[in-house]
Image: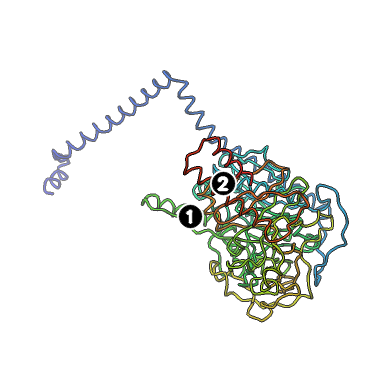
Amino acid sequence: RLAAMKSGLLGVEPARPRRALLSDTWLRVLVVGLGCAWLCTSLWLAWSLRRDPAGAASLRRSHEMTELSNEVLILRRQLASMVSDADEAAASGAGGTEPPPPPTDALGHADPAADTASRHPEFRLAMIVPWLGAELPRWFDLFVASCAGSAYLVDWLIFHEDAPIDVAAAPANVRYISLGPHGMGAHFGVQLARLTGEPNQTHTLVRLLQHAFATWPYAIVEYKPTYGDVFRDYLDGYTHWSYTDLDLVAGDLTAFVSRAELVELDILTFTFGDAVTHGRLYLRGQFAMHRLSAATSRLWLACEFLSASGGSGAGAGGGGGSGGLLHELRIKHARATRAQQRGEAFRPHFNSAEGCYSRVVATSPTLRVKYANRMIADFTSAPQVYVLLSGGGRRAAVRMCAGSEGDGTAGGLVGSPMRPTASSSAPASQRAACDPFAPPPPPPRASLLGNQRPVGALIPLVTHTNCSEWVEPRYRVCADVSGAWASELGADGAANGWNFFYLAGRWYRQRFTASHPAGLIEGALFHFQVWKRAYKRQGPQLAPIPPPGESAAFVLTKEGYRPLALRPAGGSSTGAGTGAYEYDEALASIDARLKAIERDGVSPDDRFAYAGARGAH
């Protein structure tokens, strides 16, 4: 300090310490060194690119093509959306659609009218199935073959990402639409950005959805309620649509949907009978038919996990939004990234259509909704379910034996005797024989009579929220089935013969009778939610499926499905010793011979002959 003061007074600059001089020198050396390194690197890169211009151009083109392909994919979908919006605007300007007719007490049926056409002249239902994955389910051939039985009324639209599908083997009413690699996420991202009013978030939604679908293919079920809007460009010519699954086989849906329901209802869903046994009122993921109209369009926007970013999306009475679709996807992506960094497995929570969306529908007073008891599921079915494929003059059917003894599971289904009934408590000699080949429903008619007839008027129904434990409490809708009416038998001796309605903001129940062949219970669909676990790992027990147009029959059990020997068309069983029982005895005999062959080591020719005989059965 003294030196500084002295220098200041004398006007002389003080001497700098030696350490400061050294610091400045090293700083200059460092700057010069970095500059030289940058110059050398630039010269080396320039020299390398001049030596290998093709490699540099290829690398640059590859990066540009990746970016451009994604841009083209997004732009194509945006263009399709713009065209669709213009078409809708033109249609609305031309007058729109007529409002639905007022409620009726019985949803009656029109007079029958013969119809020889291959397609219904007025209605067409699209069953939408997006599939993610490089491999198809092992039972996929059986599923596709069963779709042919509903060709008069129904098309099945299967969207995929270049999955290995044999298009030539598909029935005429099964449409395969490939969206290309990662195309599902791109399509959903573009459409949801448009539908939620956030086109500026298109690229972000595409990226997040592509990641979600590639990481968790099951995530696609979360967007089931949006299918009618997301795939709207593919629904020209259809009057109704429904989301569905692949873990099922279909009977003839034409026989289970009436013309009155197509005309008067906004939404029709099929239940397993659990609406009566457990009071569960939700839209089933296997069948929830929506009228293609403004009344059912974009209902899903009321669910917070599908709404616009920052929107309230109150979820039909369930308090407050969670930030919307984009927020939900970002949270899942962030949690998955953290779990991956920690080396941990992560499976996010997925919102089912059985939750928020079902609640939205059940609290929209302008809608007309029916919960019809017409589906079979493996967790409540008989031990054996029979599937008849259409072809050769035969109609399709999904059926099981009524009042199966000893299993305690043949209840709660399409008017089946879950509780003791006159038919199930009668001696075996007095019961109708269970004949899988009993005549199926008559050929379809334009009037579409359906297989159920209403009995009596609509009766007011009390609801509560104490059911469906897997659903968030705020989304539950339950019927009060504690009254004596729920266990009363119908005039046909069957229990659980009730359907439920939501009309003009009020709940109702109504009894019905169903037309089943003697000794059998039929369903529009058979959903094997539990049995598919065995089907995935027990491939040898899944029988091959014949080409389209060939009639065939199969018996499905929890171990797999096997072919059922066909009788001539029009034939019928004469007693309990024929039909399924005859098949089981023949199969057991052939199995015994096959075991003997393996034990005794006979010639390959004999082994092949016996294996062929088993396959024929």
Residues 309 and 256: in front is: 256
Residue that carries the numbered disc 1 in the rendered image: 332
Residue 35 falls left or right of residue 293: left
Residue 38 falls left or right of residue 69: left
Whether residue 316 is visible here, answered yes or no, is: yes
Image location (x, y in percent) of residue 565:
67, 49
* Residue type, numbered disc 2: Arg
The quadrant in which residue 68 appears is top right
Image location (x, y in percent) of residue 180:
60, 39
Residue that carries the numbered disc 2 in the rendered image: 138
Residue lying at 52% horizontally and 54% vertically, measured from the top left = 533
Residue extending farthest to the bottom is: 484
Residue 102 falls left or right of residue 284: right
Residues 137 and 49: in front is: 137
Residues 192 and 292: in front is: 292
Residue lying at 73% horizontally and 75% vertically, measured from the top left = 490
Image location (x, y in percent) of residue 577:
67, 59
Residue extending farthest to the top is: 51
Q: Height in image: 418 above or below 442?
A: below
Q: Height in image: 267 above or below 77?
A: below
* Residue type, numbered disc 1: Lys
Q: Secondary structure at mark 1?
A: helix
**How dense is the environment of label 2, judged by Cα within 10 Å: few (below 14), some, or many (20 and up)?**
some
Image location (x, y in percent) of residue 141:
63, 45
Q: Height in image: 269 above or below 339?
A: below
**How dense is the environment of label 1, judged by Cα within 10 Å: few (below 14), some, or many (20 and up)?**
some
Residues 206 and 552: in front is: 552
- Nearer to us of marks 2 and 1 is 2
